[in-house]
């Protein structure tokens, strides 16, 4: 008789894995997304602000090295004329600005004769060492040690020039000029030094007159440049102290250039 009744209906029991609460998942996902988004935004802001701070300080003190090598033959010729014959320069001494990304930036040397570059200082320093080696050889004093001492003298002289410009800016309440700007302006002295050493090799006693002339020209160039390009950005202005500092920069070129152009293969003379 049981067989006639057919199969008994199956009673469904409670599921082994009850479905999760859809509202709970929604709130959980929203909370997780909120936490992740908040932490991500905060972290991005934190690291972004840190990156902007580092980049701003790097550009403030060191600037972009590639900027200082954007030169051509026309720029190099005219720049050397201004350094060695500043009295003949009839144009202005102020650097030219242009808007870049909503900010004002200086035009590169390729487009501005008053912009500082590192090509001329580095090439002049290399030429200075070559001429120093020739001078030592003609005097019978050439040796690797003597040329090495001349290299050290040149680097010390360059450093002294940079510090002189830096201290002048600090004393006027400035000092925010990029370091590479100061290195470039200080290195222009080696252009005049090359002329002085070449005169020492070829013209003998006329060397002393040429050293005085070169010192005067380099001093005038630095005074004009510092007055228009660097001192114009200082935070305070004192007319008398301003003029004394400019005069000290010009006067310092005479002993410095004479010392560096006196090729003897030792440190002091």
Image: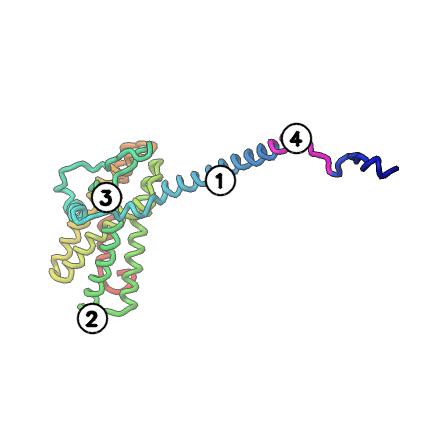
Residue 76 inside the magenta-drawn segment: no
From where the camera sits, is residue 255 visible? no
Residue 135 is situated, as x and y percent measured from the top left of the image, at: 19, 64
- The answer for how far apart the CA atoms under marks 3 and 2 are is 41 Å
Main SS of residues in magenta: helix
The colour mode here is rainbow
- The answer for how far apart the CA atoms under marks 1 and 2 are is 61 Å
Look at discs 3 and 2 and give the one toward the viewer: 3
Which quadrant holds the N terminus? top right
Residue 88 is situated, as x and y percent measured from the top left of the image, at: 12, 42
Which comes before the other along the chain, label 2 or label 4? 4
- The answer for how far apart the CA atoms under marks 1 and 4 are is 37 Å
Instruction: Determine which residue is flagged by label 2.
Output: 140
Q: Secondary structure at mark 1?
A: helix
* Left or right side of 49 for 85: left
- The answer for how far apart the CA atoms under marks 2 and 4 are is 96 Å
Q: Which residues are magenta?
A: 17-30
Instruction: Determine which residue is flagged by label 1.
Output: 47
Instruction: Determine which residue is flagged by label 3.
Output: 109
Question: Can you tell which mark lies on residue 22?
Answer: 4
Does 162 appear above or below 142? Answer: above
Which comes before the other along the chain, label 1 or label 2? 1
* Left or right side of 251 for 170: right
From where the camera sits, is residue 101 visible? yes
Residue 97 is situated, as x and y percent measured from the top left of the image, at: 26, 35
Q: Residue furthest right?
A: 1
Look at discs 1 and 2 and give the one toward the viewer: 1
């Amino acid at each position: 008789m049981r067989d006639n009744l057919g199969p008994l209906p199956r009673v469904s029991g409670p599921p082994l894995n009850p479905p999760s609460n859809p509202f709970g998942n929604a709130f959980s996902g929203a909370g997780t997304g909120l936490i992740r988004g908040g932490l991500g935004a905060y972290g991005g802001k934190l690291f972004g602000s840190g990156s902007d701070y580092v980049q701003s300080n790097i550009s403030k003190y060191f600037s972009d090295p590639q900027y200082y090598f954007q030169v051509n033959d026309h720029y190099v010729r005219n720049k050397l004329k201004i350094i060695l014959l500043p009295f003949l320069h009839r144009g202005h001494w102020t650097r030219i600005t242009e808007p870049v990304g909503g900010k004002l930036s200086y035009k590169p040397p390729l487009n501005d004769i008053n912009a500082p570059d590192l090509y001329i200082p580095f090439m002049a320093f290399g030429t200075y060492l070559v001429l120093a080696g020739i001078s030592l050889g003609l005097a019978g004093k050439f040796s690797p040690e003597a040329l090495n001492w001349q290299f050290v003298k040149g680097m010390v002289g360059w450093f002294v020039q940079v510090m002189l410009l830096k201290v002048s800016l600090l004393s006027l309440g400035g000092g925010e000029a990029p370091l590479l700007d100061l290195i470039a302006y200080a290195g222009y002295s080696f252009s005049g030094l090359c002329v002085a050493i070449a005169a020492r090799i070829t013209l003998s006693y006329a060397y002393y007159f040429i050293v005085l002339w070169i010192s005067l020209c380099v001093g005038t160039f630095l005074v004009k440049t510092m007055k228009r390009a660097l001192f114009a950005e200082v935070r305070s202005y004192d007319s008398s102290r301003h003029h004394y500092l400019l005069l000290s920069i010009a006067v310092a070129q005479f002993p410095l250039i004479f010392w560096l152009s006196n090729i003897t293969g030792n440190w002091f003379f």
